[in-house]
Image (cartoon, grey):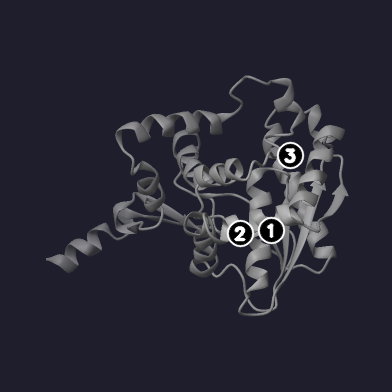
Amino acid sequence: MERAREIERSLQRKFRKTIMNRFVMALNEYALISPGDKIACCISGGKDSMLMAKLFQEIKRHNKFPFEVEFLVMDPGYTPENRRRIEENLALLDIPATIFETHIFTHVDAVTENPCYLCARQRRGWLYKKAQERGCNKIALGHHYDDVIETILMGMLYGGQAQTMMPKLHSQNFEGMELIRPLYFVREADILHWCRYNELTFLDCACRMTERRAGEDVGKRQEIKHLLEHLRQNNPQVDANIFNSVVGVNLETVISYRKGEQTWHFLDQYDTKKEENS
C-alpha cells in the first residue's frame, strides 16, 4: 500500500504538469465526463492504460461532480506469465480491477490478412459488451497524444485521407455507449518517464503474433514512429504542427470533404463566390 501511495504522490507532484494536468485538460476540453457517468476504465496491462487507471483514481478522490469508475481487464488469451504480470501490477498499484476472459487470440491466430485490425475490433466489442453489462455508459481507452499524431500520418501516407483518432465517439453497435480517450494530450515520453521514475514494468505487446516476430518492425505504425523521430531532429515542433493540422481545418482550402453520406466539392460554390466578390 505504501508503494502505491508513493506512485500516486509522483502524479500529484513530479508529474503534475506533464501528466495530471494534461489528463484533466482533455477531460475539460472535450467534455469526456458528465455528472452521473459510469465509466469502464479498460486496462490492457500496458503502461498507458495502467497510468490511466491511476489518474482516474486520483480525480475520483477529488471529483467535483458525481461519477463512477469500473476497472476492467480483458484477457484475450495471454500467456500465464503475462497474466501474472498484470495481476501483480494491479496489486502493486492498488487498482481493484475485474478480469474477464475471451479467446480472441485463438480466433485471430490463423488470420493472415489484417489480423491486428480484426483483433482490435473484437477486443473493443467485448469491452463494450462487458461494460454495458456492468451498467457503464462509457469505456475509456489509453490512447495518448503520440497515438493521435501517428494516426493522422498513417491516414495520409497509407490511407490517402485526412482523419484522426477522435477524443470521443458514440458507439455504432452498442446503443447509449460512448468511447473516450482521456490521455489525449499526454505525451508517450512523459508516460515512459513516469514508469522509469517509479521503476514500473508493464506489458509491451502481449500479442502472440508479435512474440513470434520479435525483433522485427511490425506494422505501419512502427514505420511512422521512425519517420517522426527523424523529422523531430530538424523540427521539434513537428508533433504540434501535425496535431494542429486537424484542429484548425479551413474547409475553403480543401478540394472536397465528406460528412455522413454527403460530399462537398469546392467547385459546388466556386462560381457563386466569384459573383459575390465581383
Q: Amino acid at mark 2?
A: Arg
Please tell me which residue lies in front, 22 or 258. Answer: 22
Q: Residue at x 56, y 61 (%)?
A: 12
Calculate the distance from the C-alpha at mark 1 to the C-alpha at mark 3.
Answer: 35 Å
33 left or right of 2 in image = left
Residue 5, disc: 1
Judged by depth in the image, the label closer to the viewer, 1 or 3, is 1
Q: Can you identify the residue that label 2 sits on?
A: 9
Disc 3 residue crowd, few under 14, some 14–19, many 20+, Cα 10 Å:
some
Residue 92 visible here: yes
Please tell me which residue lies in front, 176 or 17. Answer: 17
Q: Secondary structure at mark 3?
A: helix
Q: Residue at x 18, y 68 (%)?
A: 276
Mark 1 or mark 3: name the one nearer the start of the chain. 1
Q: Quadrant of the N terminus?
A: bottom right
Q: Can you identify the residue that label 3 sits on?
A: 119
Residue 151 image position (x, y, % from top left): 51, 43
Residue 173 image position (x, y, % from top left): 73, 58
Residue 63 image position (x, y, % from top left): 63, 75
41 left or right of 227 in image = right
* Circles 2 and 1: CB atoms closer than 8 Å: yes
Please tell me which residue lies in front, 159 or 255. Answer: 159
Calculate the distance from the C-alpha at mark 3 to the C-alpha at mark 2.
Answer: 36 Å
Place residue 179 in its image quadrant: bottom right
Q: Amino acid at mark 3?
A: Cys
Q: Does residue 220 sit above or below 135 in this rendering?
A: above
Residue 150 image position (x, y, % from top left): 49, 41
Calculate the distance from the C-alpha at mark 2 to the C-alpha at mark 1.
Answer: 6 Å
Q: Secondary structure at mark 2?
A: helix
